[in-house]
Image: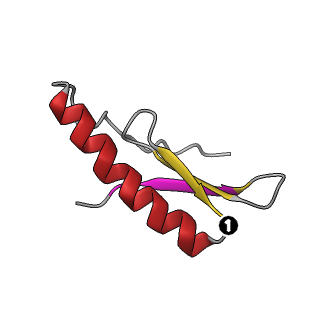
Amino acid sequence: MKYPITMYQDEDGWYVVECLIIPGCLSQGETKEEAISNIQEAIELCLEVRQEKGLPLTIDYFELEICA
């Protein structure tokens, strides 16, 4: 399955990544590659914990088009 993520570089130069459809699932890395590798691991762990707790694995995700 594909999981949408966001990535930005913080004020210290670290790349911060978050999985949009798993609440609280975020990670970081010194490089983009490290950040992506870390979020992959975080996604797996978050899904495992959510399943163990009987929580929905993901939340709904929508894209909204705004015409400016």
Instruction: Choose between 55 and 59: the one closer to the eye.
Output: 55
Instruction: Choose between 68 and 2: the one closer to the eye.
Output: 2
| Residue depicted at 33% across the width and 42% down the height | 46
Answer with left or right where residue 58 lies relative to residue 37.
left
Asked if residue 31 is among those painted magenta in the image, a careful observer would answer: no
Label 1 sits on residue: 30
58 lies above or below 55:
below
Prevailing secondary structure class for the magenta stretch in the rendered image:
strand
Report helix, strand or loop for mark 1. Answer: loop
Instruction: Choose between 42 and 17: the one closer to the eye.
Output: 42
Q: Position of residue 29 (x, y in %)?
A: 61, 62
Image quarter (top left, top right, bottom left or bottom right) of the C terminus: top right
Answer with left or right where residue 54 lies relative to residue 49.
left
**Residue located farthest toward the right when viewing the structure as drawn:** 11
| Residue depicted at 55% across the width and 64% down the height | 35
| Residue depicted at 31% across the width and 35% down the height | 60
Count of numbered marks: 1
Classify mark 1: residues with Cα within 10 Å, few (<14), some (14-19) or many (20+): few
Q: Which residues are magenta?
A: 3-8
Answer with left or right where residue 61 lies relative to residue 65.
left
| Residue depicted at 26% across the width and 43% down the height | 47
Image quarter (top left, top right, bottom left or bottom right) of the N terminus: bottom left
- Give the residue type at disc 1: Glu
**Residue located farthest toward the top when viewing the structure as drawn:** 54
